[in-house]
Amino acid sequence: MFQYIIDEIFYEVKKLDLKGKQAEYIPELAKVSPEKFAVSLFDLSGNTYEAGDTNDKFSLQSIAKVFAFTMAYRIKGKEIFRRVGVEPSGNPFNSLMQLEQENGFPRNPLINAGALAVCDVLIDELKHPERQLLEFIRLIAQNQHITFNNSVYLSEKETGYRNRALINLMKSFGTIHNSTEKVLDLYYKLCSVEMNTGELAKTFSLYANEGNIYGTNKQILTKSQTKRTNAIMQTCGFYDEAGEFTFRVGLPGKSGVGGGIAAVHPGKYAVAVWSPLLNRKGNSVKGMKILELLTTKLGWSIF
Ligand code: GLU
């Protein structure tokens, strides 16, 4: 059934002439072909169903913030919420305004300010933050080949003026402990991690599977922590379009400016889509459409 629906919705969306733009503020992302389009669904019986450019890897960008948060939550437990909140921002992902008004305390771990604070926590807690974060992502992906994309990392490092401003603002309020350079470096490495849609869907199955890595007995988050992580994705995972995504798709998930979206139906499946064409809010236009069709055609709902 899944393969039939995946093929059907893939071709349905491909036919629509949906418009969008690559993320031009990161020069390396602007070079990705606008035609790329892929979808993969991983169910909790271990099967993958997919269509399109599923061999191509893309940089996860903000989707990877979920993995950094997962690692920090696993280490710190609920203490992590002393460093980041759980409220949707209703603002663009890189907004400075709210951070200034709220004394440098980031609204949630999935906006840039929150993810930078999470990276700061990881630097405090880990001996080799970059290596250990990558090892953690490889562990939950069950794939030793996952790695950073160096050109994307360098491209963003060169042009990330706003992220530098966000950290410096937080530093002025005392909410970041480590040097701006150290935190930015880990954050850009994180954003440049790349996967294809099949790898991403499988990695995200953690959140559909009560915090357990599929096919292993490794519990990464407790059942309650997984529920809370999904709740944060549901309310904060799509920049200032989290309401729209919930309204149209109805699943917890996270998007990235690389054009990827990963989402889960707890207890059933994880799905990843990729098309670099973004709408004005920074979410993949085809990605949102295909997920809307998926949940409509499946007729299953978490609500
Ligand atoms: N690396 C990107 C940035 O910091 C991530 C943005 C995103 O995917 O939302 O601007």
Image (tube, grey):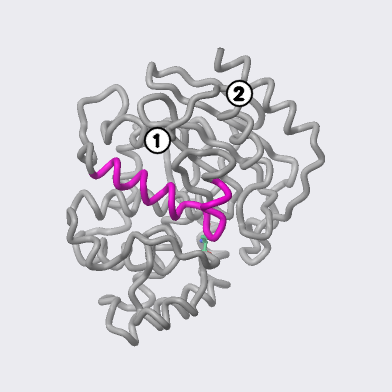
Residue range highlighted in magenta: 225-245
Instruction: Between residue 260 and residue 18, name the one nearer to us.
Output: 18
Q: Disc 2 marks which residue?
A: 297
Residue 218, picture quadrant: top left
Cα gap from disc 1 to disc 2, whole angstroms: 24 Å
Amino acid at pointer 2: Lys
Among all residues in the image, which is located at the extreme front?
303
**Mark 2 or mark 1, which is nearer the start of the sequence?**
1
Q: Is residue 146 above or below residue 149?
A: above
Q: Residue at x 72, y 46 (%)?
A: 33
Which residue lies at the image location 73% right of the left edge and 26% below the top edge? 11
Q: Tell me where residue 101 appears, x and y as whole percent.
A: 41, 82
Front residue of 195 and 217 = 217
- Note whether 113 is above or below 103 in the view shown: above
Who's the residue at 42% across and 77% down the image? 99
Residue at 33 percent of width and 74 percent of height: 105
Find residue 127 and report its horizontal and vertical position in percent: 19, 60
Q: Which mark is residue 182?
A: none
Residue 243 percent across, percent down from the top left? 53, 52
The answer to which image quadrant residue 266 occupies is: top left
